[in-house]
């Protein structure tokens, strides 16, 4: 299963280190106090730092490269994510992303594309 150390994955935009944080108590999308990573340099949200939405029956994400303690080529389940209230694609749409934000896997759920 995915691991979530204090120092998270590098930013896929600028390749700089990420930092650990927690969503505010007033988060409007039901993620209050949820742990996450964001880029130290460009302030971009990277991924959640928990197993929320990481389900065995999600589409597979095959990005074990560089992840310690995992066999190269190991298949990882993706993370189910829902677009938030401010999403330009419309709120409440479901998509899948790499659970650890270590590759660019991204896919709409069937029916939300």
Image (cartoon, rainbow, N blue to C red):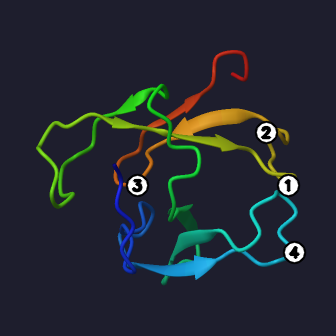
- Residue lying at 41% horizontally and 44% vertically, measured from the top left: 104
- Among the two numbered marks 2 and 4 on one chain, the one whose residue lies closer to the N terminus: 4
Residue 26 bears which disc, if any?
A: 4
Distance from the alpha carbon under mark 3 to that under mark 2: 23 Å
Residue 79, position in %: x, y? 52, 42
Q: Is residue 49 above or below residue 105?
A: below
Which of pointers 3 and 2 lies earlier in the amino acid sequence?
2
User: Which of 48/87 is in front?
Assistant: 48
Badge 4: residue crowd in 10 Å (few <14, some 14–19, many ≥20): few
User: Label 3 vs label 4: CA separation?
Assistant: 25 Å
- Cα distance in 3D space between marks 1 and 2: 9 Å
Question: Do residues under tags 3 and 4 come within 8 Å of each other at their CB atoms?
Answer: no
Residue 2 spot, x, y in % from top left: 36, 53
Residue extending farthest top: 111
* Callout 1–callout 2 Cβ contact below 8 Å: no
Left or right? Give the position of 13 relative to 25. left
Report the disc number at residue 86: 1
Q: Nearer the viewer, mark 3 or mark 1?
A: 3
Circle 4: element type? loop
* Residue 15 pos. (x, y %): 35, 69
Q: Disc 4 or 1, which lies upstream in sequence?
A: 4
State which mark lies toward you, 2 or 4. 4
C-beta proximity under 8 Å, tags 2 and 4: no
**Which residue carries the number 3 mark?**
100
The alpha-carbon separation of the residues under discs 2 and 4 comes to 23 Å
Describe the element under mark 2 as helix, strand or loop. Answer: loop
- Answer whether labels 4 and 1 touch (C-beta < 8 Å): no
For marks 3 and 4, the one nearer the N-term is 4
At x 69%, y 22%, the residue is: 113
**Of circles 3 and 2, which is in front?**
3
Secondary structure under tag 1 reads loop
Vertical relation: 47 (above or below) 92: below
């Amino acid at each position: 299963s995915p691991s979530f150390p204090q120092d998270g994955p590098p930013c896929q935009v600028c390749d700089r280190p990420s930092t650990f944080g927690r969503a505010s108590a007033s988060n409007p999308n039901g993620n209050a106090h949820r742990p996450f990573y964001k880029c130290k340099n460009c302030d971009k949200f990277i991924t959640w730092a928990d197993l929320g939405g990481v389900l065995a029956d999600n589409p597979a994400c095959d990005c074990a490269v560089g992840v310690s303690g995992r066999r190269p080529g190991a298949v990882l389940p993706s993370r189910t994510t829902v677009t938030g209230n401010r999403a330009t694609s419309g709120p409440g749409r479901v998509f899948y992303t790499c659970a650890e934000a270590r590759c660019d896997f991204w896919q709409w759920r069937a029916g939300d594309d």
